[in-house]
Image: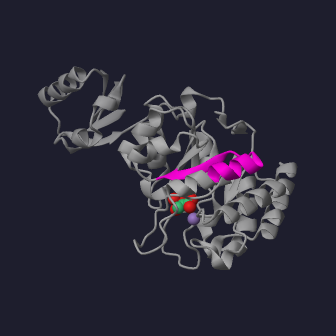
Amino acid sequence: MIAQLKNTATPTEIEMLVSWLEKKGVKVTPIHGEYCTILGLVGDTTKIDIDVLESMSIVEAVKRISEPFKAANRKFHPEDTVVDIGGVKLGGGNFAIIAGPCSVESEEQIITTAKAVKAAGATLLRGGAFKPRTSPYDFQGLKEEGLKLLLEAKKETGLPIVTEIMAIHHLPLFEDIDCIQVGARNMQNFELLKALGKTNKPVLLKRGMCATMKELLMSAEYIMSEGNPNVILCERGIRTYETYTRNTFDLSAIPMLKELTHLPVVADPSHATGRASLIRPMAMSATAAGCDGLEIEVHPNPNEAMSDGAQSLKPEQFVEVVEAVNRVRSIL
Ligand code: PEP
Ligand code: MN
């Protein structure tokens, strides 16, 4: 961390600041220039509140040199992390497609979809049992029954399950679930993240719709700092002023995150665009941008879906998307 001091700072004020910083446990190296003094701070700077330091009357500006995320940082862990979801690997060159309906609606719906997405090449089955809906009057998911149906679909197809958790107290219900999804709306539910950090379950952490990449990485840090290294990040679009698409797919987040972190990065073109017609081009683009996997919503009859029908693919459309993605991968 570097602190630039105002040129009005007196030697006594500088001395007082240096001793305040040293008491926080960092080593301070002052550089006295012609016009101002710069303090170089090394060591564990996490104890220093950057806003407090910046608000001090003799401080002009403060800059953090190292990122605040450590466990997720590629600098300290250059090799890609590979996350194993019930035998399906993701990251480090292992590509996985997570597919299934937005919501689990019935036994027939989830089993038909599971068989169809497996036949098309998906290796993981998704489906929401606990649904975060904007309106409390909309379908909220089949809850425990939904989880049971997902496990039945797993028995039928062998596909490991990815499904969203909304509350800490539901955690015991997820015992047999292979990968727990934290949705965009819960990306900063820190108590939930800490609780997931105490398990060793793979966690698919989706980017909040108004979250920066740094905030996403800090949320991953919450899980990892509790001892769970099995985190997969998901870019699912962010909110902008655009209205033709449900969100704005931040394609650049994929290579940016891959530079910053060793964690696998998955892209979700379904929630990112909200439109079935855009899934194929965006899935291809995300693959070309270097994602480690895709999460795509598929429904046997999108027009009748209880949630996210407009962005859900019919099984035959999903087949085409997988073929297109595989063509991109073969070029890469
Ligand atoms: C979902 O995956 O169904 C979902 C609700 O996604 P998000 O949290 O990204 O909106
Ligand atoms: Mn959905």
Where is residue 301 shown, x and y percent of the image? 71, 74
Residue that sits furthest to the left in the current view: 12
Vertical position of residue 314 compared to residue 290: above or below? below
Q: Does the image show residue 66?
A: no
- Given residues 302 and 311, the one toward you in this image is 302
Q: Give the range drawn in magenta.
A: 150-165
Q: Residue at 82% x, 50% y: name it.
A: 329
Q: Does the image show residue 109?
A: yes
Where, quadrant-wise, is the N terminus in this rendering?
A: top left
Q: Residue at 85% x, 59% y: name it.
A: 323
- Given residues 124 and 15, the one toward you in this image is 124
Where is residue 213 shown, x and y percent of the image? 50, 50
Q: Does the magenta stretch include residue 137?
A: no
Vertical position of residue 282 compared to residue 158: above or below? below
Q: Is residue 163 magenta?
A: yes
- Given residues 204 and 324, the one toward you in this image is 204
When asked about the image quadrant of residue 28, the answer is: top left
Vertical position of residue 220 compared to residue 121: above or below? above
Vertical position of residue 322 compared to residue 156: above or below? below
Q: Quadrant of ligand 2?
A: bottom right
When asked about the image quadrant of residue 146, the answer is: bottom right
